[in-house]
Image (tube, rainbow, N blue to C red):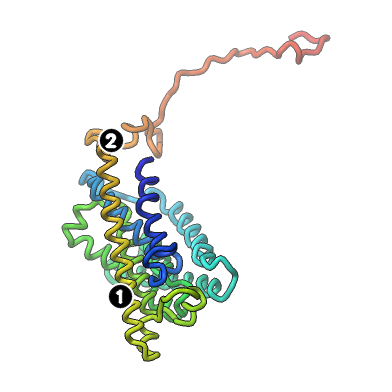
Amino acid sequence: MLFVPLWITLSYTVGAYTIWGAGFLREYIIDYAGGYVIHLSSGVAGFTAAYWVGPRHSHDRKHFPPNNIINMLGGAGFLWMGWTGFNGGSPLAANTITSLAVLNTHICTATSLLVWLSLDMVVYLKSSVIGAVQGMITGLVCITPGAGIVDTWAAVLMGILSGSVPWFTMMVLHKKSSFFQDVDDTLGVFHTHAVAGLLGGLLSGLFANPRLLEMFYPMGKQGPGFIYGIADGKFRHGLRQMGFQFAGALFITVWNVIVTSLICILISRMIQLRMEEDDLEIGDDAVHGEEAYALWGDGERHPPPLRFRMTPRMPSFCRRPDRKF
């Protein structure tokens, strides 16, 4: 109740104003629908908050099975469907940019999902539903900053990279790095949001089509993308845009690390950020007095029986005068 309003006010709003509002990066950064403003910032903030809260018990981290894969698939479907409006609605109009954004969103996401599953098959000799959902999310996040300003062939390449780079950081680098092991990133949001958001922002600066940029940023100084800069003989302009993309990512990252840390420190001075160790052993029952999922009687409570009259009587105003009850 304290963290969310503080983070939205002091961190997210500042990033959104700086890149989308009247901030100093507004005319230079390519961020079509929030790869930096939303996903990079939330991924970095979530990872930073996890650092300050601390890890779960070791046995909880080793044995952490999914609760309901069917429900997860349903939620993933709603997420993908909603992202169509998320990216497609960013121009606030029904035009060429909107159509291209919707098409690129689906192409990049589907490609990313297939690449993630393929890597699972090659390395682990089997695919998984959880891996498919992770690949879907990284594809959605990666295409977000460039959905309406890159061509379809670029969306395919972004899908290939969004299905492989976050896969490597999550499945390989995370397991080998002591730093990642010390921070208990339960859902892997650093990889699916921070890494994928950063990747999408940089690739948008690489593949941005100057004609589409003029349509979406009529008053801005963005572009061209580095690839188009080389092709059109504007190498310095393309290199300059890549520099701005790196600068925007650096600003969002540093700002979120600092502000999120200060918020966590402030809250820790008022209330505990972390449950007591004994309560962690018990779980939900220690906090709420009930189990989140009461299966086969687990967590079942038996309230005292209610006393009902075995022969209820009708109210007098409901009785017929010629009958007795």
> Which residue is labeled 1 in the image?
243
Going 65% across and 14% down the picture, which residue do you hit? 312
Q: Quadrant of the N terminus?
A: top left
Task: State whether residue 202 appears in this view.
Answer: yes
| Residue 152: image tag | none
Label 2: which residue? 270
User: Residue 65 at x, y = what percent?
Assistant: 32, 50
Residue 256, by quadrant, is bottom left
Q: Is residue 156 visible?
A: no
C-alpha distance separating marks 1 and 2? 41 Å
Viewer-side residue, 36 vs 165: 36
Between residues 33 and 99, which one lies in front from this camera angle?
Answer: 33
SS for dot 2: loop
Q: Residue at 38% of width from left, 61% of height from top?
A: 39
When the figure is inspected, residue 10 is found, relative to residue 94, above or below; the finding is above
Query: Is residue 310 toward the left or the right of residue 78 in the image?
Result: right
For residue 2, which quarter of the picture?
A: top left
Of pointers 1 and 2, the one earlier in the residue sequence? 1
Find residue 29 and report its horizontal and vertical position in percent: 38, 70
Q: Label 1 amino acid?
A: Gly
Residue reaching furthest to the right: 322
Q: Residues within 10 Å of mark 2 (few under 14, many from 20)?
A: few
Residue 27: which quarter of the image?
A: bottom left
Crowding at dot 1, Cα within 10 Å, few <14 / some 14-19 / many 20+, comes out as some
Q: Is residue 141 above or below residue 316?
A: below
99 above or below 128?
below
Tell me the SS state at disc 1: helix
- Amino acid residing under circle 2: Met
* Residue drawn at (37%, 91%) of the image: 233
Q: Where's residue 168, x and y in %?
A: 27, 68
User: Which residue occupies the foreground of this view, 61 or 12?
Assistant: 12
